[in-house]
Amino acid sequence: MSSFASSGSPSFSQSAKLAVQQGHFQQAITLAEKGIMENETDLESRYCLAVCQRKLQQYSQALDSLSVLINMSPEYDRAYQEKGYNFLAMGKKNEAIDAFDTAVKYNPSLLASWKVLSEETTYHRQKEAKVYYAWLSSLPRELVTVASYIHQKKLHKAEQLCRSFLKKNPRNVEAMRMLAELGVEFQILDDAEFLLESALSFSPNFTRARFDFINVLHRRQKFHQALEQAQTLFDADSNNPLFIVGLANAQQSCGEFELAVETYDQALAIEQNNSSILVSKGHALKTIGKVPEAIVSYQQAYQQRADYGDAFWSLANLKTYRFSDNEINHMMEQVERDSTSAEDKAHFCFALGKGFEDRKEYARSFEFYASGNTLKKAKSRYDLSKVTYELDYQKQHFDSAFFDKFKNAGCASQAPIFIVGLPRAGSTLIEQILASHSQVDGTMELANIISMAHHLNGRRVNSETPRYPSILQDMSFEQCLNLGQKYIDETMAHRNGAPFFIDKMPNNFRHIPFIQLILPNAKIIDARREPMACCFSGFKQLFAEGQDFSYDLSDMGNYYRHYVDVMDHWDNVLPNRILRVQHEDLHENLEQQVRRILDYCELPFEQNCVEFHQSTRPVRTPSSEQVRLPLYKDAVHQWEHYDGFLEPLKHALNES
């Protein structure tokens, strides 16, 4: 497998590569420099230049070339590997270890980096490095290439090569596992589940496959099945910290938060300094309202690992925590360090944005929010045109006549209450109000509708026209019924026996026609918030996944505008079908709006819904601490402090 991808200026970079392979390093430098002159962003030529400089023992020049490359592409994994080779040649072992460690964080398929790390006794993850090196060394060369393609996001190349290998080696469980990994990337989770289940039937002791199986079951929100698999690993070796943490994560997903905390403590008894375990424990404590204990756990995490941005963001994401001067200074130092990963820098930037916002230093706050979003957008594959196509198609093709044709289709269940809209628009508040009712189960942001939509769409390359949502026009009554019943059956695991339950996945607003076809009696509540407040609140929130439109103010504004347009369409096509709840109205007259929501859901009034903040139910979203307090109006106009920085957002919102 070549270390040089075919991008940038192929004539010069490929010629330079050939010269390197022939040992003509000075000639390769000349060719690489010509490639850079022709195209400054030719990363392959820059990488080739650095390799040649190292080969000629020009270590300082090579490191300078790599610094430029990393500044242009912070996640260019082989650049860090090259830095490691230079530092080794210069006798700087600690710097070399840090560089190789960063390389494998960005691409765990770098065999050469793992080899060096596996031989370094001072490396804190030497045991893990030996495992990775042994695993990669044991793989056929084709599968090493597949692994590399996956980490480079060359997914269709990876799939083609993996499927070709599997045709020749149909029982190779590692190839099955990799194809399942690709299924996860393509959001075809049921295929991934089947592949991993098959691999484990052939090789029950295949630990990597079982870990991946747990992850897929978790993503499919089959939490109790994931817990069974995690228990299997734990029972095999109850002293293995990875297995203990896996069990704790699964317990937490099943709502067994107190037990999860105990299990995390069991893992910490073996690995006292493991910062990621401490953060996971903090999340469990936060979810059940034990915020002081969660704060201690997050603080212990960053005390163990100074550049662990997630620990600081977890503190900021409590919304109620206030950073000390020392913490602010520490985060700013970490952001400036070259050795801090792009992911950690993003976490630090969002945390600093919140830290300076709390200090009313809004210009500095916005600077860090913007920097964090820029780092996240660099990794994002968000494409506004796909959203535009999808929602415009719905407006053009799903009219009253279409729904009249399907008026007797779908599953008749009245149990689901969907809360849709944009994130940070108040959906958690509405959920907490409804979940305080004796006849309603609160669940979480259920992925079932989105997963079904992905499955209907199938595997598509970026250039292909999506099959979804156009495929909805060809659905049979039987399909509508079966898919609706499938949704009811799959979500049963999240319910606690009440006749109604909430699905508060905000992005389900993009699937209104699908919901209407398969669950025509479900309730749908549109959580709406004033556009500037909603969009800026989303911009300053670091989401775990699924909200890539939030990393740019223009993208955010355009997304909001398209959301409003399509919801207006449903108001016309499906009158009185969807209840709109304006977030600001809840603040103005809570009881009036609570009664309005309950009337729409055909539920009797209960005072607990007005006193929602007294509920002790676990809340898993960023608003968890806010909904445990009575309503307050401070955040309604918070965006106005940043008014001077939000012109791109205003422009996008006001486009015709």
Image (tube, rainbow, N blue to C red):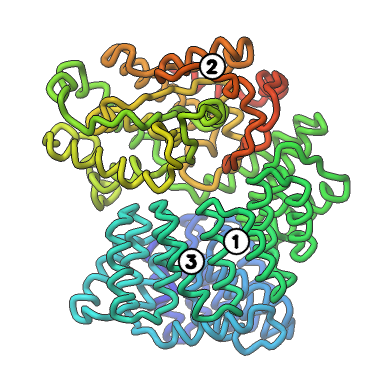
Q: Nearer the viewer, mark 3 or mark 1?
A: 1
At which x and y percent is residue 253? Answer: 52, 54
Q: Nearer the viewer, mark 1 or mark 2?
A: 2
Quadrant (top left/top right/bottom left/bottom right) for the N terminus: bottom left
Disc 1 marks which residue? 70
Which residue is at a point 72% across and 39% down the rendered structure image?
A: 353
Taking the image as shown, residue 438 lies to the left or right of residue 462, namely right
Disc 3 marks which residue? 45
Residue 450's label in the rendered image is: none
Under mark 3, the amino acid is Ser
**Do the residues under discs 1 and 2 have CB atoms within 8 angstroms?**
no
Q: Residue 75 is drawn in which quadrant? A: bottom right
Q: Earlier in the sequence, mark 1 or mark 2?
A: 1
Q: Earlier in the sequence, mark 3 or mark 1?
A: 3
Taking the image as shown, residue 602 lies to the left or right of residue 623, namely left
Which residue is at a point 54% across and 39% down the rendered structure image?
A: 551
Which residue is at a point 44% across and 20% down the rendered structure image?
A: 603
At which x and y percent is residue 228? Answer: 44, 66
Task: Give how far apart the Cα atoms at labels 3 and 1 are.
Answer: 13 Å
Q: Secondary structure at mark 1?
A: helix
Under mark 1, the amino acid is Ile
Disc 2 marks which residue? 594
Taking the image as shown, residue 418 lies to the left or right of residue 637, namely left
Under mark 2, the amino acid is Val
Which residue is at a point 39% across and 44% down the rendered structure image?
A: 447
Q: Is residue 470 above or below residue 460?
A: above
Task: Give how far apart the Cα atoms at labels 1 and 2 are.
Answer: 53 Å
Q: How would you rate the neighbour count of disc 1 (Cα within 10 Å): few for under 14, some for 14-19, many for 20 or more? A: some
Q: Secondary structure at mark 3?
A: helix
Taking the image as shown, residue 345 lies to the left or right of residue 509, namely right
Q: Nearer the viewer, mark 3 or mark 2?
A: 2
